[in-house]
Amino acid sequence: MDYSKLEEILHYQFHNKELLDTAFTHKSYVNESHTVCESYERLEFLGDSILEFVSSDVLYHQYPDYPEGKLTKLRASLVCEYTLSQITRDLGYGDYLYLSHGEEMTGGRNRSSILCDLFESVLGAIYLDGGIEAAREYVNRFLLTDIENKSTFHDAKSLLQEYSQGKGLTLEYKLVASRGPEHNKEYEVVAILNGVEKEKGTGSTKKMAEQIAAHRTLLKIK
């Protein structure tokens, strides 16, 4: 795989390209191909820990007046599946993914849960290749920007409910589609204000899809 375009986007040049191969290898590919290669799961495990540390460090210093509970809630909004998958979707991570034929056919290349994993696996790869400062730069560049807008995700449904009540509007969510096998479904929901369809959200549960639809609607309103 040629990673030169991706490295340009990441502003990071890998010394060991095999780390990127591993970071983009889904376990289904390993199982199907029977090749001696490793999936991204160990790198994801490492990246998850680094992500928690780096984001906690930044939030601790950036919000000195926030108590522990508020910092925890803010971090949860930033490192959730929706936020991370949106970032990697925009970065085109799905194009580099090694998947089994079955995962490919059921939309795995664009599945939010997998794209979320890839943010952390690439972070783990950067850390092993370039150390903690390179890892920190990756998190700062792609995640810890526009924190205020990202932070509304955790409370998106309640915030949109408050907005609609304040304006005297009715708010409801409508399921418009469900895709994929029973064990790995994705749901698409649209937020409706006063009978007018607003933004849509897709998630692994109806609740997640509603949360995403609410967040996108809030951002559009703002």
Image (cartoon, rainbow, N blue to C red):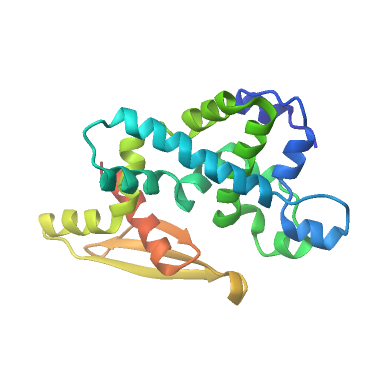
**Where is residue 125 shown, x and y percent of the image?**
67, 36
Residue 40 locus on image (x, y percent): 69, 49
Residue 100, position as x, y percentages in the image: 77, 59
Q: Is residue 199 visible?
A: no
Depth check, front residue: 143 or 73: 73
Residue for point 65% across, 60% down: 107
Figure quadrant of the C terminus? top left
The image shows a total of numbered marks equal to 0
Q: Nearer the viewer, residue 97 or 137?
A: 137
Q: Say which of 215 and 59 sits in front.
A: 59
Q: Quadrant of residue 148?
A: top left
In front: 151, or 173? 151
Residue 195 found in image quarter? bottom left
38 horizontally vs 159: left or right: right
Q: Is residue 29 left or right of residue 157?
A: right
Left or right of 32: which side holds 176? Answer: left
The residue drawn where x is 28% and y is 58% is: 157
Q: Quadrant of the N terminus?
A: top right
Q: Does residue 56 sit above or below 212 in this rendering?
A: above
**Residue placed at 12% from the left, 55% from the top?**
167
Is there any visible trace of residue 136 in the rendered image? yes
In screen coordinates, is 86 left or right of 73?
right
Vertical position of residue 72 compared to residue 56: above or below: below
- Judged from this view, the residue extending furthest toward the right is 35
Q: Residue at x 58, y 42 (%)?
A: 47
In the picture shown, does residue 121 fall above or below 212? above
